[in-house]
Image (spheres, coloured by chain):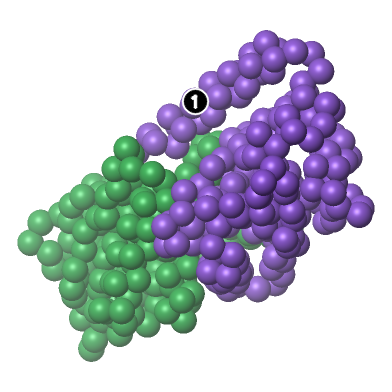
Chain colours: A green, B purple
Amino acid sequence: MVLVGIDPGLAATGYAVVAAAHGRYQALRYGCWRTAARLPLGDRLLHIHDQMSALLREQRPATVVMERLYQLRDGSTGLAVGQAIGVVRLAAAQAGLDIAEYTPTHVKLTLVGHGQADKAQVQFMVQRLLALPAPPRPDHAADALALCVCHLPSGLSRTAGPAQPSAGSDRLAAALAADDRAQAAHRARLETP
Amino acid sequence: MVLVGIDPGLAATGYAVVAAAHGRYQALRYGCWRTAARLPLGDRLLHIHDQMSALLREQRPATVVMERLYQLRDGSTGLAVGQAIGVVRLAAAQAGLDIAEYTPTHVKLTLVGHGQADKAQVQFMVQRLLALPAPPRPDHAADALALCVCHLPSGLSRTAGPAQPSAGSDRLAAALAADDRAQAAHRARLETP
């Protein structure tokens, strides 16, 4: 099974392709699509959509895994990142693919065991679980890899202790439930006409 | 010259097609694309993008005119409407078209003469300038028509007094300059990586 992970943004969209087979995971490809702020907004969105569509055609993933954003600084930030998310989601829908979404907190909980883990801790776990020679760079690509790993929970139990929550599964379950409630409230707001 | 006006939204996107020739304007078509909140978000964006692409193929407009939003309630609102704007902007870029954008305040100033005009006043002016038999409905379609009319300023001077700012062009110029400054600040925020 192949997964495509996306950390969406207008200036930089991180992407990753991870293959899973026989309990082993492999990062096939990862990186970042950048668009220059001096370009017209339409051209920037065209670039992101073209890159995403080409990646889906090439890799034929089972699922797209994307970061779910719901705590944004203000309406303008939401408007900018929303446009990038819109064209990424459109490319997935045009390819007939579902999108699985996880909040950054969910990813940190799953990979490191607590929702306040820092970037270095997440990158260490991604490096370890995917057996990469060095911590993945840039940050957006690392986040896209982390999203793929987050979507493959069975692997975590096979690989290592540190990926398990150190404070017991009850605390993890409670934290994930709180995360789900926040996401549900966000979805309800999104669906208000 | 044909213009396509768009009032973008996830639940409802207003559209309008206005033709201008020999100082006369004609509303060729207007309405609203609605998407049900129960549908997956990807399908809703696919619908908006398909409708927009089909309209641009059929009508071959010179320009797309869109509402510029920059004062949004919060990040979630921006994220929702941003996704709709993203796929509309993508469809225009795929058709090689530029987008002219006007804030609601700009539209009200141009059509009615003051930025606090209410919907009924704007719709009255749209009806009058396009010689429609009744005020245009629904509101999203009326807004899309108003955007097209706003982009055709030469017509206003030919048609009627009420479309001119009653308080003199200095006040209009000052108000538009303030509007431009707010938009410039918004663009600067958008372009922050």
- The residue at 46%/81% (across/down) is A96
Picture coordinates of residue B114, whole percent (x, y): 78, 24
Q: Furthest-left residue in view? A: A133
Residue A106 located left or right of residue A74: left
Residue B105 located left or right of residue B3: right
Q: Which one is in front, A118 or B60?
A: B60
Residue A124 located left or right of residue B4: left
Q: What residue type is labelled 1?
A: Ala
Task: Decide if residue A84 is in sight here.
Answer: no
Residue A30 located left or right of residue B183: left
Q: Which one is in front, B119 or A159?
A: B119
> From the image, which quarter does the N terminus of chain A lie in?
bottom left
- The residue at 84%/28% (across/down) is B162
Picture coordinates of residue B120, whole percent (x, y): 89, 40
Question: Mark 1 — residue?
Answer: B185
Task: Decide if residue A184 is in sight here.
Answer: yes
Against A108, residue B152 (above or below) is above
Against B165, residue A177 (above or below) is below
Given the image, what chain letter belongs to the residue carrying mark 1? Answer: B
